[in-house]
Amino acid sequence: MEATPTNLILFLLPSILFISRAPHVTPATPCPPCGNTTVPFPLSTTPTYGDSAYKIRCTTNTLVFDTLNNSYPIESINPKSQRLVIRPAPLVPNTCITTDKIHQGIQLNNTLPFNITSSNTIVYLNCTQALLMSPLNCSSSSLCHTYINATASASVCNNGLLCCTFRTGGSTTSYQIRVRDVGCSAYSSFVNLNPDLPVNRWPQPGLEIQWLLPRETVCTSQKDCDSATSACGLDPSSGSGIKRCFCINDLVWDPIDGVCTKSKLNWYRIVVFCF
């Protein structure tokens, strides 16, 4: 019996799936695990692993994210969404001041491919009256009061001190969460917080950071690339003589896994041909 288009597609589906997994260049050298934690591309713990523009550190089996003037432990990494979560600084015991106040809080380098996402709810504590002129919610109904009243370590902040709450995502919070004398002296952060939940059901404190998708890997000569699937050539957009392993033979760069692979457009053409 003549195969219908639907039957033909089902018949060819295994082949399509096989083609989608066609041979591709060996991924950019992945980092070894840090303790029990996998370090996905493009994150890099040494110059010879991953992409050096996405530098993090492995210290005593713990991954660490360096800011301009401080360091924070990495709690989790999601390579598919290009996001990681760092642990915010704690309060100095028996004070309403975070330990990173000396560094003016979290300050990212805006020349690197990392920025703070819009998924963070920030609780600012021990704030000055100047914050009343800001767009932050510093009212008596602000979520920060709920946090203070239900958190033992933050109870010291419940002494008539002003507190505020806001959601990250604006241009002023893309690269920094500031703590200072003229603003607020302490903070905490929660990723994807549901404000309707009681504090004991909030997630652990964390600040979510995302990274930009990486370019092709840097090379100095063809020996740094897989000659079957990529060629080392000048990056015309760099303006500084940087070379990269550019994909060849109709392959395209996959920035998630750091490989040259078959174009999804080719898979689409195969499906259309089946009709």
Image: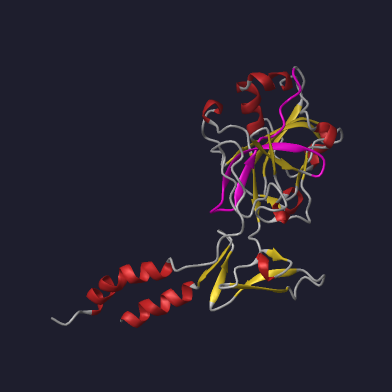
Count of all numbered marks drawn on residues in the image? 0
Q: Residue at x 71, y 37 (%)?
A: 72
Q: Residue at x 54, y 25 (%)?
A: 200
Q: Indicate whether 97 appears above or below 2.
A: above
Q: Is residue 91 left or right of residue 268?
A: right
**Of 255 and 121, which appears nearest the observer?**
255
On the image, which quarter does residue 21 sit in?
A: bottom left
**Of 104 and 137, which appears nearest the observer?**
104
**Of 243 and 117, which appears nearest the observer?**
243
Q: Indicate whether 15 appears above or below 26.
A: below
Residue 76 lies in the magenta-colored region:
yes
On the image, which quarter does residue 164 sit in?
A: top right
The answer to whether any part of residue 253 appears in the image is yes
Residue 166 lies in the magenta-colored region:
no
Where the N terminus falls, by quadrant?
bottom left
Residue 225 position in % (x across, y down): 64, 67
Q: Is residue 268 left or right of residue 251?
A: left
Bounds of the magenta segment: 68-93
Q: Residue at x 36, y 71 (%)?
A: 16
Residue 218 position in % (x across, y down): 70, 64
The answer to whether any part of residue 216 appears in the image is no
Where the C terminus falls, by quadrant?
bottom left
**Visual colour scheme:** secondary structure
